[in-house]
Image: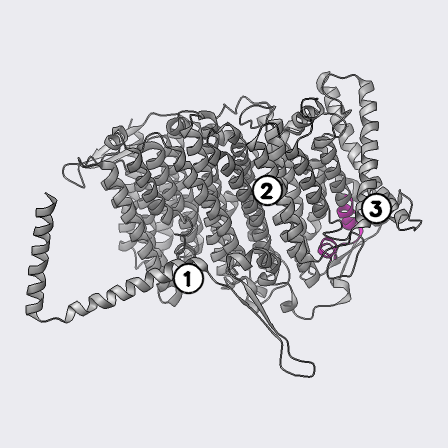
Amino acid sequence: MIPAVTQQVWCVAALLGTTALAIATSRSRRSTAIVYGATFAISLVALAGALFSLISHASATELILPIGLPWLGSHFRLDALAAFFLAVVNLGGAAASLYGLGYGNHEPAPQRILPFFPAFLAGMNLVVLADDAFTYLLCWEFMSLASWALVMAHHREADNARAGYVYLVMASFGTLALLLAFGLMAGAGGSYSFAAIRSAQHAPREAALVLGLMLLGAGSKAGLVPLHVWLPLAHPAAPSHVSALMSGVMTKVAIYGFIRVVFDLLGPPSWSAGVAVLALGGATAVMGILYALMENDLKRLLAYSTIENIGVIFASLGLALAFQANGLGLAAALAFTAALFHVLNHSFFKSLLFFGAGAVLTSTGERDMEKLGGLIHRMPLTSFVFLVGCVAISALPPFNGFVSEWLMFQAVLQSPDLPQWLLKIMVPAVGALLALAAALAAACFVKAFGITFLGRARSPAAQAAGEVDRYSLAAMLSLAALCFLAGILPGVVIDALSPVAQAMIGHRMPVQANDPWLSIVPIEESRSSYNGLLVFVFITAAASLAVYFIHRFASRAIRRGPAWGCGFADPTPAAQYSGASFVQPIRRVFGTLVFQAREHVDMPAPGELRPARFRVDMHDLVWERLYTPVTEVVWFLADRLNQLQFLTIRRYLSLVFATLVTLLLALAIWS
Amino acid sequence: MVVISDILVQFAQMTLVLLLAPLLTGVVRKVKARLLRRRGASIFQPYRDLLRLLRKEVVLAENASWLFRVTPYVTFAAIWVAAALVPTFATGLQFNWSADLIAIVALLGSARFFLALAGMDVGTSFGGIGSSREVMIAALAEPAMLLMVFCVALIAGSTQLSTVATFMASSEVGLRVSLGMAMIALIMVALAENARIPVDNPATHLELTMVHEAMILEYSGRHLAMIEFGASLKLLLYISLIICVFFPWQITTEGAGPLSYLVSVAAYILKLAVASFLLAVFETATAKVRVFRVPEFLGAALMLGLLGTLLRFVSRSF
């Protein structure tokens, strides 16, 4: 029997082999089918392996390969946490490959994508498997670069070049932060294997510094505000199945890194760590969804919504830290399980929604929602699965998004047990932020679905749309089914997550399989319970009952006629509510503060013949207040340093001499 | 045996809310009319309206999709299920534990989600304006509602409505500041969610300030009947919720005899009558506010909910 970790490493090797295959077959017309077929099969095998070791509560297995640093080698390890995240990665990988089998055929230059796609999957798998700092950082960079290459696949579009540049800068910055974090943890001795870091003692100040660096490093990859700026640029720029992977899966790999370091390697947390993570998570959730609401580009809207979900996950992790620091193991396990559940859910529905956006893009060539509309008539299946994704991400029962949200609120309600005043007050306030984010998310996805799929077509392209191919539909349908299943059978998921919570927190939620009728009960039944299956059965039964009685005993006549609209027939589809007008009330409530939104109405005087104009000014304050000044400083310094390039040889020599003397002096004074 | 009687009680509750909902709407309208010194329609008029609508054919806009036709039933079912889970006359119903207070809020959210989508389906500007305002109101009302839930749940130690009602019916609760704040917050949210004055006017048509009515403008016949029925049920649900959490006197708790069911049903109907009278008085005495003043109204509810929750943390005796 080969150890589980070795199997996974073989899968990674197979993925890298597929990259070579993609290069070798790049001239063949069947290259797309070969590559995606291979990644689909490999991801399924890896998924099966990961799920098996997660559910069978297998003990951790390790593998050391003699590559990498000579005195260190490459350590790989598969424990419960890694198994869970491997399952997330490979499920997303399998779905994206299946989708790619159809979607990839529309690609004008497939050789720009095919070699990098398996490499990207391999990179994400490797990050999760890595068990020493060097391998981890190497794989992290590999993953970043592979995804960067995919972002640049359509590099001739000006926006994409900028997206790629910003992504590269932010990714390097993130890796720098991670490098420093691991350097701090390894200490002066330089023990880089995770086992050594785990067993070492970390001073409180050092732990706080590492936490801050992890929030910068993993947070910038995951999209925490204010480090999120690259995400809405880069995720939509890639082809849609890669966008799905970046949003649905790569952000989760970043969360894996955060959990691995903060919950596993750093040892027992302090409660102030919980405060920082909670605050960042809550702020990210609300900011992310407000950005998403204001967006009219379907894929960018989805990318911003990813930021919201990352905020929700981080808030939940912050709760887990706060409870953990105070020895409230059960509550910590509840919050931690809620976070992992949301990780899983988000990977399902965000991949599904990006696939749907990709289907709309292939079918109409449009990402701008203001030019879409009425697609429910022309893409019935796509619109149905997209609707499922929208309901799930809006945290509505009986779908999966609601369950993780519900668990999170149950964890928030455990807060009276916390001894610190700051936390006692902060936890319900963050709960309020999460509730606000959830309500705004529902509004956002009413907009996303309503403007894109409902109403009348706003452009000839939307008028002429047609349903997409079978592979894409199969990928979307299977993810929609997973959203539904995880929503009505949450107990199964919670039980599957228990080994991870046990390993990281030391506690687990009560066994859900024993509860009657497949209910979930976080603590005890008199406190709270939820049964998605029954809720679903009730709604179906009630609706069927109503339909049956009405159609049997009342009228079933139907007449088609023109829309009523109070007698005001709208002559053109342009008179419909657009995306921007849909969010106008919310923009007025929140946007004046958050985006400094100002509306300007230019109304001509009576008798004048020019048209009236309406303009909205909005500002992205994060760019203007944070990134623009930083860029300006960098420009200024670069400009100054530039002058050093044009000196005479004598000046260069004297500069070298002066540097040498300064360094020697510094050394002399230091020691 | 116990299971059968439990299921019977649950079934009775489901039927009871269904039968009472139009009557409640009728009573509110009647009292309002009397307060305005009009004679008003009979309190049974909503039943007649529903029957009339049910018998009529549906006039469907040419552009309407399947979503438009499914939504009335989905929203009605979601609201009905939610209403059936709020203890009205007895706690410990058989299916109470399948969804707690947070799930009930989310069920109503599902109903609204689909209704807002249906408003955008036909592609008229009226539907769009209704949907966009509805989601704006919901985006503020839902967090306020959840904060109210937090506040009550922290005091009762549970989000399970049966447990909450049993706890509130016991004598150890007393008067608490945070509960008072939560109650006001809940009433404000209930007014907003049910499209009542001062947020929306259930009696207007053809006015740009309308929200809910604009959203369902394209509906007719049996579809409209389902939506109107759902709206009545929702009003009943919110009033039942207020009664169950803050005034659960005479509610039948577990292990009581059949006679107590009679008493508690009578008490419940009496409480409903009082509530509908108060609602009518309040609506007559206030004016509708502009749509962009609604955020202030709901922001106050949000703040009250948050204050209630925080006060609960500051001291256990509040």
**Screen quadrant of the C terminus of chain A:** top left
Q: Residue type at mark 2: give it.
A: Leu
Q: Identify residue for label 1.
A: A624
Residue at 79% of width from left, 16% of height from top?
B257
In what element is the residue under mark 1? Answer: helix
Q: Is residue A214 magenta?
A: no
- Judged left or right of residue A286, residue B253 is right
Q: CA distance from mark 3 to mark 1?
A: 56 Å
Q: Is residue A612 visible?
A: yes
Q: Quadrant of residue A650?
A: bottom left
The way the protein has been coloured in the rendering is one colour
Tell me what residue is drawn at x 87 percent, y 44 percent: B31
Q: CA distance from mark 1 to mark 2?
A: 36 Å
Specify the amino acid type for callout 3.
Leu
The magenta stretch spans which residues? B210-229
Disc 3 to disc 2, C-alpha distance: 29 Å
Nearer-N-terminus badge (1/2): 2
Could you tell me which secondary element the residue under label 2 belongs to?
A: loop
- State which mark lies toward you, 3 or 1: 1
Badge 2 is on which residue? A396
- Residues marked 3 and 2, same chain: no
**Residue A543 picture quarter:** top right
Q: Chain of mark 2?
A: A
The image position of residue B117, as x and y in percent, is 64, 53
Question: Are dots 3 and 2 in contact, CB under 8 Å?
Answer: no
- A282 in relation to B268, above or below: below
For disc 3, the chain is B
